[in-house]
């Protein structure tokens, strides 16, 4: 809930941060209020933060809108803390806060799920939404300051100088991850994402010589806690087998819808809609991308239940009624895996299902995003800490933390997803 009158203050009641305050009595505060009120930002209310996680965790209904406000709140707090010890000009401080607010503005329907299906990265649409002159976001930013939109875009892209400030928005220790771990943990009910946020905020600092963020020595344990939280949230939530099985059904039904559409089959759609463009295989323009949200995709899937195409109708019905696929871990050597998949394909075909749509392999992609590793070509993806008290030095965290070194093997998983009614037959194929 938020008050909306100009010349006053807005208070957003938040499940993680309690109250998020926007002071609209100042020009800076009115800027952020105006950004929040744009249609592009309000669209984030209609995009679930965790995509299809609600199939596995029924309370995971939170949105990109709430997460973006949370990231903005953290950026505001950290910038205020850093400004007490470092000279941060007003234009840089405002740009960082705006980038935190807008970092997810380009997300597609169901968050990352649609990205993998359609082959785009939301960051590109975020930058376009911020920099294209015809968007409301750009008009608000430019009206405040002519160069603000480009500065915000540079922070999100990681090309902004000062680099340390950009790291607050995009790095291995940024306000995006700090917020979503706590928020996703709270909303799913999984306790793995809880860590000592307050001590990290207290301990974060700027290494002016090397233009980078670091954490002061008392905060090392809090960062270890944070990295472990990320590790376990990935394993237990972001790569939950039920969530991934639900994603496989969505991928299959969209795949089938485009195939049937290309052949002139029965695929209902709103004429001129973003979904029609997707069915036609077109890359969405920024305007069409910003039209699309979770409700559009769900609406079309509901109509496809009545399709004359049996496969599309069946997959759409499974998705809407949560009769999702089962996932089976392929934790076996390569030879056994190939034999198992060939046999599973035979079972699927013998039961009258097309394996192209009813037997899908799934692997833990983008694991580097979730797990901290020192093996990187980008310095922004390293976390630096102050080590030692009598003669402190700034070092990369895995050099001084056995706990972090233990996390660097990461997590790899490969699964196959198939209709639940075939579970006994398929799982019986492999008995180690």
Image (cartoon, helix red, strand yellow):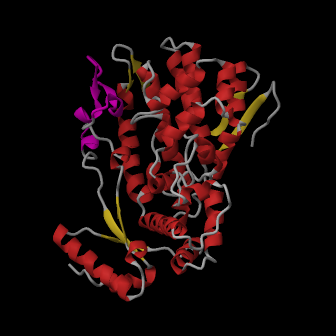
Question: Magenta segment: does it hold 391?
Answer: yes
For this rendering, which residue is in front, 41 or 349? 349
Q: Residue at x 38, y 82 (%)?
A: 423
Residue 422 visible (yes or no): yes
Quarter holding residue 325: bottom left
Q: Which of 388 and 99 is in front in this view?
A: 99
Total tally of numbered discs in the picture = 0
Q: Tell me which residue sits at (42%, 82%) in the image.
A: 353
Identify the image quadrant of the C terminus.
Answer: bottom left
- Residue at left 57%, top 58%? 60
Residue 297 x %, y %: 61, 60
The answer to which quarter of the image holds residue 245 is bottom left
- The answer to whether residue 58 is above or below residue 43 is below
Residue 93, above or below 425: above
Q: Give the range drawn in magenta.
A: 377-405
User: Which is more toward the observer, 213 or 388?
Assistant: 213
Instruction: Tell me where residue 411 appears, x and y as whole percent.
Output: 30, 54
Residue 327 visible in the displayed image = no
Residue drawn 41% across the image and 22% down it: 163
Whether residue 220 sits left or right of residue 16 in the image: it is left
Q: Is residue 35 magenta?
A: no
Is 66 left, or right, of 88 in this rendering? right
- Whole-percent x and y of residue 48? 59, 53
Image quarter hosting the N terminus = top right
> Quick check: 320 above or below 65?
below
Name the spot of residue 312 as percent of width and height, x first: 54, 74
Q: Is residue 138 left or right of residue 86?
A: right
């Amino acid at each position: 809930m938020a008050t909306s009158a100009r010349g006053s203050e807005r208070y957003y009641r938040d499940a993680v941060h309690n109250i998020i305050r926007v002071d609209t009595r100042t020009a800076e505060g009115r800027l952020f209020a105006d950004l929040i009120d744009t249609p592009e930002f309000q669209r984030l209310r209609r995009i679930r933060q965790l995509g299809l996680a609600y199939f596995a965790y029924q309370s995971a209904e939170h949105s990109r809108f709430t997460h973006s406000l949370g990231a903005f709140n953290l950026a505001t707090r950290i910038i205020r803390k850093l400004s007490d010890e470092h000279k941060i000009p007003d234009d840089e401080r405002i740009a960082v806060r705006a980038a935190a607010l807008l970092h997810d503005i380009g997300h597609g329907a169901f968050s990352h799920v649609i990205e993998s299906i359609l082959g785009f990265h939301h960051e590109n649409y975020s930058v376009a939404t911020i920099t294209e002159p015809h968007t409301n976001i750009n008009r608000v930013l430019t009206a405040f300051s002519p160069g603000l939109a480009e500065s915000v875009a540079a922070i999100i892209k990681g090309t902004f100088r000062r680099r340390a400030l950009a790291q607050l928005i995009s790095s291995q220790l940024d306000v995006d991850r700090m917020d979503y771990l706590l928020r996703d943990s709270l909303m799913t009910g999984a306790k793995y994402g809880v860590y000592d946020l307050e001590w990290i905020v207290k301990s974060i600092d700027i290494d002016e010589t090397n233009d980078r963020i670091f954490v002061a020595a008392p905060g090392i344990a809090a960062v270890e806690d944070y990295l472990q939280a990320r590790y376990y949230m990935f394993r237990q939530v972001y790569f939950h087998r039920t969530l991934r099985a639900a994603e496989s059904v969505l991928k299959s039904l969209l795949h089938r819808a485009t195939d049937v559409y290309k052949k002139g089959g029965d695929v209902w759609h709103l004429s001129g809609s973003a979904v029609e463009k997707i069915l036609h295989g077109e890359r969405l323009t920024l305007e069409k991308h910003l039209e699309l949200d979770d409700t559009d995709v769900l609406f079309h899937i509901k109509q496809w239940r009545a399709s004359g195409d049996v496969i599309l109708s069946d997959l759409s019905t499974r998705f809407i009624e949560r009769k999702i696929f089962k996932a089976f871990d392929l934790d076996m050597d390569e030879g056994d895996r190939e034999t198992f998949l060939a046999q599973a394909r035979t079972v699927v075909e013998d039961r009258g299902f097309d394996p192209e749509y009813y037997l899908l392999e799934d692997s833990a992609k983008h694991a580097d995003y979730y797990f901290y590793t020192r093996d990187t070509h980008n310095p922004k993806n390293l976390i630096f800490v102050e080590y030692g008290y009598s003669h402190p030095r700034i070092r990369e965290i895995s050099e001084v933390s056995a706990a972090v070194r233990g996390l660097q093997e990461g997590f790899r998983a490969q699964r196959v997803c198939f209709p639940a009614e075939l579970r006994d037959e398929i799982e019986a194929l492999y008995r180690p």
